């Protein structure tokens, strides 16, 4: 059989991974290996409240942000940023 497609050098081939934005809370929670339930339990709040904070459905009180930052080993500023997350 004869190849009909032209060969393209690999240095010209780019594979783009889809990227989505996630909140700093999501990013650092996943980095710590915690579920929403586990983070909520450690903070004394519900899993649904953690979900709301991660998705900006409600504003997270500074008191909770401070405790979350201490627990996750980061700063409040970092929790309020958005991060690129590569989808698998």
Image (cartoon, rainbow, N blue to C red):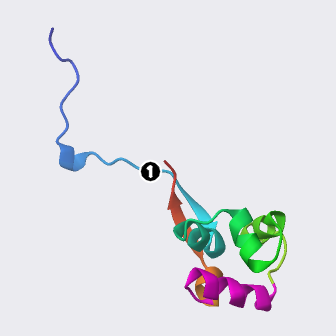
Q: Is residue 31 above or below residue 74?
A: above
| Residue drawn 80% across the image and 67% down it | 52
Q: Which residue is mark 1?
A: 17
| Residue drawn 70% across the image and 90% down it | 66
Q: The N terminus appears in which quarter of the rendering?
A: top left
Instruction: Give the quadrant of residue 41.
Output: bottom right
Residue 72 lies, in percent from the top left, at 59, 80
Q: Main secondary structure of the magenta part?
A: helix
Residue with the most extreme top position? 1
- 83 on left or right of 11: right
Q: Helix, strand, or loop for circle 1?
A: loop
Indicate yes or no whether the magenta region holds residue 71. Answer: yes
Indicate yes or no whether the magenta region holds residue 77. Answer: no
The boundaries of the magenta stretch are 61-75
Pick whichever, 60 or 37, lies toward us. 37
- 32 on left or right of 47: left
Residue 83 lies, in percent from the top left, at 55, 70
């Amino acid at each position: 059989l004869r190849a009909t497609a032209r060969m393209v050098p690999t240095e010209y081939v780019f594979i783009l991974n889809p990227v989505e934005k996630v909140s700093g809370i999501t990013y650092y929670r996943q980095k710590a290996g915690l579920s929403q339930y586990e983070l909520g339990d450690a903070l004394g709040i519900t899993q649904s409240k953690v979900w709301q904070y991660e998705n900006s459905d409600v504003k997270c009180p500074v008191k909770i942000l401070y405790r979350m930052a201490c627990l996750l080993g980061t700063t409040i500023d970092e929790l309020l940023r958005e991060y690129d997350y590569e989808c698998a």
